[in-house]
Image (tube, grey):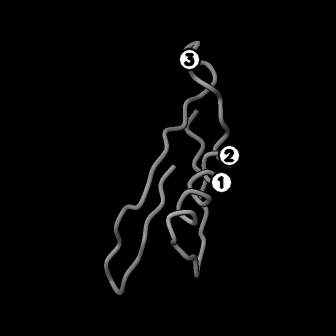
């Protein structure tokens, strides 16, 4: 899961979180869905002071 910022004509990465399918988890891992990871990213960016004018979601299922 990725979050990007746009300033003028420049696109830059802000944050990412790794999605792990349930079959690949170790005992230490906690399963999180893609929407859960996206929600965490949005919450963390808001806590850092980012404001959103536009939010675009694109889900690509490669499991």
Kindly identify the residue that appears in the image at 51 percent across and 71 percent down.
49
Q: Examine the rendered structure and indicate whether residue 54 appears above or below residue 44.
A: below
| Depicted 24 relative to depicted 46: above or below | above
Label pair 1/2, CB-CB below 8 angstroms:
yes
Dot 1: what SS?
helix
| Image coordinates for residue 26, horizontal then vertical, percent | 55, 15
Up/down of 48 relative to 20, above or below: below
Q: Which mark is residue 30?
A: none
Q: What is the distance, in whole Å, between disc 1 and disc 3 at their CAs?
A: 21 Å
Q: Are marks 3 and 2 in contact (CB under 8 Å)?
A: no
* Left or right, residue 7 beside residue 34: left
Q: Residues within 10 Å of mark 3 (few under 14, many from 20)?
A: few
Which residue reaches farthest bottom? 8
Look at the picture and state if 30 lies above or below 60.
Answer: above
Q: Quadrant of residue 22?
A: top right
Where does label 1 land, which residue? 39
At x 54%, y 37%, the residue is 19
Q: CA distance from mark 3 to mark 2?
A: 18 Å
Q: Earlier in the sequence, mark 3 or mark 2?
A: 3
What residue is pinned by disc 2? 36
Seen from the viewer's position, the closer of residues 44 and 2 is: 44
* Cα–Cα gap, marks 1 and 2: 5 Å
């Amino acid at each position: 899961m990725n979050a990007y910022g746009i300033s003028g004509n420049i696109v830059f990465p802000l944050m990412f979180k790794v999605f792990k399918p349930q079959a690949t988890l170790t005992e230490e891992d906690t399963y999180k869905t893609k929407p859960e990871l996206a929600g965490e990213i949005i919450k963390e960016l808001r806590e850092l002071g980012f404001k959103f004018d536009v939010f675009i979601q694109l889900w690509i299922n490669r499991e």
